Image (cartoon, rainbow, N blue to C red):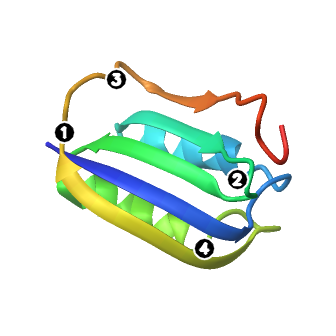
Amino acid sequence: MKRLSALVYGKVQGVFFRRNTELIALKLGLTGYVENLKDGSVKVVAEGEEDKLKDLLVWLHKGPENAIVERVSYDFLQATGEFKTFTKVWSKDAFWL
């Protein structure tokens, strides 16, 4: 098991990026969360099999139909097993709720 920690930059808030990321991650059997950040980026932390995390990473580079992904920074780390499912995090400090 591995952990993917990613930041997605571009027009990625207000375009259903979190919802679609959640659906893709759940379909892939991953756990973790996706969160809008106040700088306009989206943070993704996911755990699961490395090949499934790589599938998610490919999708993060494209995003949903109305997104414009400029870049994705990411790291693969050791999984902690702290998550039970994959969810959207609601942050009051986000650029777009």
Q: Amino acid at mark 2?
A: Phe
Q: Residue at x 70, y 62 (%)?
A: 64
Q: Are marks 1 and 4 in contact (CB under 8 Å)?
A: no
| Farthest-out residue, bottom | 70
The alpha-carbon separation of the residues under discs 2 and 3 comes to 20 Å
Q: Are marks 2 and 3 in contact (CB under 8 Å)?
A: no
Disc 3 target residue? 83
The alpha-carbon separation of the residues under discs 3 and 1 comes to 10 Å
Q: Which label lies toward us, 1 or 2?
A: 1
Q: Residue at x 19, y 39 (%)?
A: 79
Disc 2 target residue? 17
The alpha-carbon separation of the residues under discs 1 and 4 comes to 25 Å
Name the element at disc 2: helix
Q: Which label lies toward us, 3 or 4?
A: 3
Name the element at disc 3: loop
In depth, the one of 55 and 73 nearer the eye is: 73
Q: Amino acid at mark 3?
A: Phe
Mark 2 surroundings within 10 Å by alpha-carbon count, few (fewer than 14), some (14 through 19), many (20 or more)? many
Q: Which mark is residue 37?
A: none
Q: Which mark is residue 62?
A: 4
Does the rendering let one see residue 6?
yes
Question: Which of pointers 1 and 4 lies earlier in the amino acid sequence?
Answer: 4
Q: Residue at x 14, y 42 (%)?
A: 1
Find residue 88 and report its image quarter: top right
Disc 1 target residue? 79
Mark 3 surroundings within 10 Å by alpha-carbon count, few (fewer than 14), some (14 through 19), many (20 or more)? some
Q: Is residue 24 left or right of residue 40?
A: left
Q: Which label lies toward us, 1 or 4?
A: 1
